[in-house]
């Protein structure tokens, strides 16, 4: 609801969706990203990607691998 109100009030304001933090789990990131795309109010995404998520210094559970990220981006069809 907040992003929709922001866009209504400030139409030129670019908004980014952060499905990594919104979901908290890597397997949920694609679903959140697709839902955000359906709303068509976001200008882009911030998605956490790491070559080896288990060895990342933070947010281990929400990191995508580069392959998972590539697969996700292909499905979003910008």
Image (spheres, helix red, strand yellow):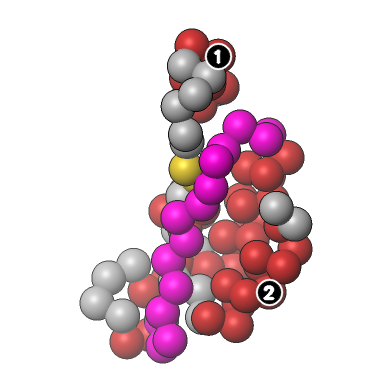
**Quick check: is 45 in the magenta stretch?**
yes
Work out whether residue 6 can be spotted: yes
Locate residue 2, reporting x and y percent: 48, 23
Work out whether residue 5 can be spotted: no
Quadrant occupied by the N terminus: top right
- Dot 2: what SS? helix
Locate residue 25, reporting x and y percent: 50, 64
**Residue 30 shown left or right of residue 15 in the figure:** right
Point out the tag, 2 or 1, that comes first from the N-terminus.
1
Mark 1, residue position: 8
Residue located farthest toward the top when viewing the structure as drawn? 9
Mark 2, residue position: 71
**Residue 78 shown left or right of residue 11 in the figure:** right
Mark 1 is surrounded, within 10 Å at the Cα level, by few (under 14), some (14 to 19) or many (20 or more) other residues, namely few
Q: Is residue 21 above or below residue 49?
A: above
Locate residue 43, reporting x and y percent: 55, 41
Magenta span: predominant SS is loop
User: Which residue is rendered at x = 51% and y = 80% of the image?
Assistant: 65
Please give the range of residues in magenta: 39-53
Residue located farthest toward the left when viewing the structure as drawn? 57
């Amino acid at each position: 609801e907040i992003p929709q109100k922001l866009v209504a009030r400030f139409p030129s304001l670019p908004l980014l969706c952060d499905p990594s933090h919104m979901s908290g789990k890597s397997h949920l990131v694609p679903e959140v990203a697709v839902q955000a795309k359906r709303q068509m109010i976001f200008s882009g995404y911030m998605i956490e990607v790491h070559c080896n998520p288990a060895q990342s210094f933070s947010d281990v559970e929400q990191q995508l691998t580069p392959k998972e990220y590539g697969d996700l981006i292909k499905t979003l069809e910008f």
